[in-house]
Amino acid sequence: MIDFIEGQVAYVETDAVVIASNGVGYRIFTGNPFRYREGEAQAVRVYTHHYVREDAMHLYGFATRGERDLFRKLLDVSGIGPKGALAMVAAGTPEQIIGAVAHEDIDFLTRFPGIGKKTAQRIILDLKDKLKKMPVLTVATRVEGMPDTAEQENLFSAFTEPKEEAMEALGALGYSQAEIQKVMKKMEKDGTDLGSTDQIIKRALQLFVMK
């Protein structure tokens, strides 16, 4: 099993990042591919989960082991596939999700795309005891090659392109166009900086779990 992949970012797609390592390009699905920068000379490390089914084999990537471990726990819940689990890990921190399960906060859990009341109840029933034993590793070292906040402002020079890319990425996570348009309007109203795809996605995901 591949535990992590370390290499250079070859290119970024709406729902995935491609890491070049030892002459091989690994396509890794991730909640926010735009946190990575194409052509970055410094190597990045992405923690991976190898998902196998009859008709496909996919790699899912995470910035920390804690995010990946939570993703794996969510996959154990009946009715949650990799897309749903990825959307949850992308929008909420492990601490938030573990806290919501511990306090049986169904309202919080149903804010994620594709998670209804019954699925939220199943998450709580299946994972409440298991997550108590899970070490939260989000306070990890910064992933090498990922931009600092100040650097992210210069990731994209155009205004419309980052916004469109962010909307496509949010759609790939399962959010509806109506939901996406709603948070976009709120960000514009609040004066949020829309010059960086990464920042747009991060802020939109925060707003989705705050609604």
Image: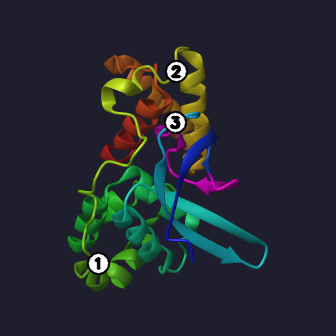
* Amino acid type, label 2: Phe
Labels 2, 1: front one: 2
The stretch drawn in magenta includes residue 118? no
Chain part drawn in magenta: 21-36
Q: Quadrant of residue 54?
A: bottom right
Residue 83 shows in this picture: no
Which mark is in front, 2 or 3?
3
Q: Which mark is residue 41?
A: 3
Residue under label 1:
131
**CB of mark 2 within 8 Å of CB of mark 1?**
no
* N-terminal label among 2 and 3: 3
Mark closest to the chain's N terminus, 1 or 3: 3
Q: Position of residue 195 (x, y in %)?
A: 46, 19
Say which quarter of the image contains residue 192.
top left
> How dense is the environment of label 1, judged by Cα within 10 Å: few (below 14), some, or many (20 and up)?
some
- Seen at 35% across and 83% down, the residue is 125
Percent of width and height locating residue 65: 37, 65
In the rendered image, the vertical position of residue 33 relative to residue 58, given as above or below: above
User: Which class describes the residues within 10 Å of circle 3: few (<14), some (14-19), or many (20+)?
Assistant: few
Locate the C terminus by quadrant: top left
